[in-house]
Amino acid sequence: MTDQTTRHLPAGLPDRIQHYIGGKLVDSVDGDTFDVLEPVTNEVYVRAAAGKAADVALAVAAAREAFVNGPWPRMLPRERSRVLHRIADIVESRDARLAELESFDSGLPITQALGQARRAAENFRFFADLVVAQSDDTFKVPGRQINYVNRKPIGVAGLITPWNTPFMLESWKLGPALATGNTVVLKPAEFTPLSASLWAGIFEEAGLPDGVFNLVNGLGEDAGDALVKHPDVPLISFTGESSTGQLIFANAAPYLKGLSMELGGKSPAVVFADADLEAAIDATIFGVFSLNGERCTAGSRILVERSVYDEFVERYAERAERVVVGDPQDPRTEVGALVHPEHYEKVVSYIEIGRSEGRLVAGGGRPEGFEAGNYVAPTVFADVPPSARIFQEEIFGPVVAITPFDTEEEALALANGVRYGLAAYVWTNDLKRAHNFAQSVEAGMVWLNSNNVRDLRTPFGGVKASGLGHEGGYRSIDFYTDQQAVHITL
Ligand code: NAD
């Protein structure tokens, strides 16, 4: 536990958060705002413009104008790439400030927020390089035909993002959308608008033309909904809850929009008896408690082979008790404050449900000494049956369910026995088993004896209720571009 008595208010906080439309910071047309809370005290520290359909319409019009008449879609990939590299340089040079603001606004531990700021810079660098390296199919049928591909930006991309690691997740969409020559309207999550308010200054400094990037703050059911239903927005890239994704899918259907959906998860970490237990415990502790457990790929169900089950549970619970909960701005902190009191209530209500579904072996709610703020002790339930709600439902906090299994078949059935399919982690020293399990597990991404680190060229996305479509590498480029085939008879 770290010191709870000092409140760290970052210097230079804005006195209000506005929209950014056509190169200008503006308030909502109707002047409406919403409160933004600081997760350590739950005090309102700023008010943000609450966008509605009228604000979205202005932002889309600015983005459309920049797409139809502006230079951005017509620039060479190399020229756009230079701007994106400048964006990456600026983000990198401000990583400490970004981390300070992100940690303050979201409750993420500062050291982890710093890593996310650097990853945001890397996202821009990666897509800046990729559009220059990009090659497309050309096929020649000698004496008969030449076929080639015209790759074109699509138009105004609507980007809707969640509150967990907000700046980094915004960059994961902004990077490829901009690199490919689209213009964008970003609707960041209403719990965490602070870091998104920095994009405008960063983009102006890097030389992005006005109107290419637009931002509308506001609630999902107002600003987000208006973006999804705007006829001049042919693409929606969404990251958030599966239920929101379903609603957006339905709302976008009349417009036949291109959709990329990165949704929720309840990912299994499967530990076989022959695994390196120390490494598996390390990784599964990190896998569910880092980023406050507010991580889409969190390994929130741990399935353990029965012969090592008791030992695993005992050692795991002991490690969980030692995870340092504290002030997000303290570099010693490993679990900070959850993002918002509403989310805190949700996580704590699952812990109460878990008390009758499993055996509580660590944590169990608000840690001692933390009277205010959205603090939750790393919480571990053992002996959790697959029918339990804490086994089936995404909690999105520092709460993990551990379940024993006897055979590989049973482990697979347990791993696949939920509606989600985002990630899976397998711990075993039997390589054949590891690869066969990876083949059969219903997950978009599998880590074998490893944890969450990935090459940005690989596909990122889920199956089942965890998403539709994949981003990452050329898959992102494909989503944000039309590929027109041209055929010439010789
Ligand atoms: P959320 O679905 O509540 O909100 C996400 C965004 O959608 C917000 O900007 C919100 O304002 C907006 N929104 C809400 N209702 C809308 C509507 N009707 N129309 C348009 N937009 C709307 O999700 P959240 O609570 O912010 O984020 C947590 C969720 O995100 C978790 O389920 C997590 O697993 C998921 N997530 C997934 C990934 C991934 O890559 N698969 C990554 C991060 C988070």
Image (spheres, helix red, strand yellow):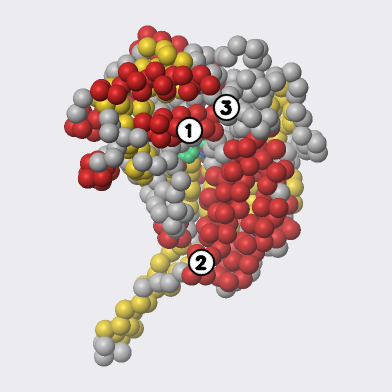
Q: Look at label 3 and name its amino acid.
A: Val
Residue 213 locus on image (x, y percent): 64, 54
Residue bearing mark 2: 131
Sequence-earlier tag: 3 or 2: 2
Residues at marks 1 and 3, CA–CA distance in whole angstroms: 10 Å
Q: Nearer the viewer, mark 3 or mark 2?
A: 3
Sequence-earlier tag: 2 or 1: 2
Residues at marks 3 and 2, CA–CA distance in whole angstroms: 37 Å
Residue 79 falls left or right of residue 140: right
Q: Is mark 3 within 8 Å of ligand 1?
A: no
Q: Residue at x 29, y 37 (%)?
A: 428
Would residue 339 be visible to someone looking at this image? no
Residue 100 falls left or right of residue 435: right
Disc 1 packing (10 Å; few <14; some 14–19; many ≥20): many
Q: Look at label 1 and name its amino acid.
A: Phe
Answer above or below: position of 22 versus 98.
below
Q: Provide the secondary structure element on which disc 1 rests.
A: helix
Residue bearing mark 3: 335
Would residue 183 be visible to someone looking at this image? yes
Disc 3 packing (10 Å; few <14; some 14–19; many ≥20): many
Q: Residue at x 35, y 77 (%)?
A: 138
Residue 201 locus on image (x, y percent): 73, 52
Q: Residue at x 53, y 59 (%)?
A: 126
Q: Nearer the viewer, residue 196 or 379?
A: 379
Q: Nearer the viewer, residue 215 or 306?
A: 306
Q: Looking at the rendered structure, which numbered label has been put on residue 260?
A: none
Q: Is mark 2 within 8 Å of ligand 1?
A: no
Disc 2 packing (10 Å; few <14; some 14–19; many ≥20): many
Residue 468 locus on image (x, y percent): 37, 45
Q: Looking at the rendered structure, which numbered label has been put on residue 286?
A: 1
